[in-house]
Image (spheres, grey):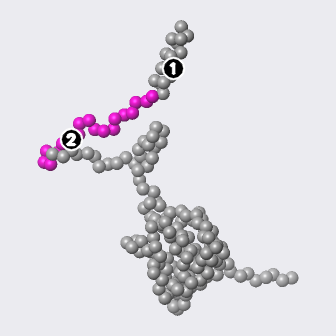
Amino acid sequence: MERFFTPVCLLGLLSACTAQIPNTLPTDPEIDSSSNRTQFSTDHPAELRYGRYTLVSTEPTTEQRDLLAQIIDVSIPSSLSPSVQDALQYVLQRSGYSLCPDAAAVKVLFTRPLPAAHYRLGPIPLRRALQVLAGPAWQLKTDEVGRSVCFEQQKTDAGVALITPASPRQPEARP
C-alpha cells in the first residue's frame, strides 16, 4: 500500500504546482474585406507578464526618454590630472551626447584644472553633473538633434559675467 501511495502523492503534488497559461492570441481575428489583411489591435498593454511571477512595464523610463535625466555615479581618475574639458568628456562617454567643439568663448572654462571636489560626482542626474562641472558662470545648452552639449557664459544686464559666491562671508563677532 505504501508503495502505491507514495507515487500517487508525488503526482498529486506535481500537478498542483502547474498553472494554466491563458491564451492571449485572438482565435478569430476580424478580416478587413477591402485589403484582406488581418486587423489586430494596436493597443499595447502597459504591463505584461514576464516569467511566472513578474509584471514588467512596457513604457520607456524617464532616463530612456530624456538621456540627460539619467542618474550617473562617476569617479574621475586623478592620475590624469584632468581639466574641466577632460572631466566633461569623461562624464559624457556613454551618455549618447558629445561635447561641442571648443570655441574661443569656452576656452577659459575648458582649460581650467578640475577642482578636487569634482573628482567624485553622484549619484546625480547627468544634466546637473554637467552644470556642476561647468560652474555657476556657465549655462548648459543642448542640441537635441545633434546630441551635443555646449556651454555659454551667463551675462548680466551690464554685460559682465555673473559670478555668485558659494557661501557669503559673514563678519566675525569680536568681544
SS type, badge 2: loop
Residue 63 position in % (x across, y down): 47, 61
Q: Is residue 116 visible?
A: yes
Residue 36 position in % (x across, y down): 15, 45
Q: What residue did someone put label 1 on?
A: 10
In primary-sequence order, the first of circles 1 and 2 is: 1
Figure check: 164 above or below 52: below
Q: Which sits in the foreground, 144 or 46?
A: 144
Figure check: 33 above or below 119: above
At 42% from the left edge and 61% from the top edge, which residue is drawn?
65
At 48% from the left edge and 20% from the top edge, which residue is drawn?
11
Secondary structure, magenta segment, majority class: loop
Q: Residue furthest right?
A: 175
Region in magenta: 18-35
Q: In the figure, is residue 65 to the left or right of 134?
A: left
At 71% from the left edge and 82% from the top edge, which residue is drawn?
169
Q: What residue did someone put label 2 on?
A: 30
Residue 1 position in % (x across, y down): 53, 8
Q: Residue furthest front?
A: 79
Mark 1 neighbour class, 10 Å CA radius: few under 14, some 14 to 19, many 20 or more: few
Q: Which quadrant would residue 74 be assigned to in this image?
A: bottom right
Residues marked 1 and 2 touching at CB (< 8 Å)? no
SS type, badge 1: helix
Q: Amino acid at mark 2?
A: Glu
At 46% from the left edge and 23% from the top edge, which residue is drawn?
15
Q: Is residue 130 visible?
A: no
Q: Which sits in the foreground, 99 or 43?
A: 99
Which quadrant holds the C terminus?
A: bottom right
Figure check: 149 above or below 59: below
Q: Residue furthest bottom?
A: 158
Q: Which sits in the foreground, 172 or 63?
A: 63
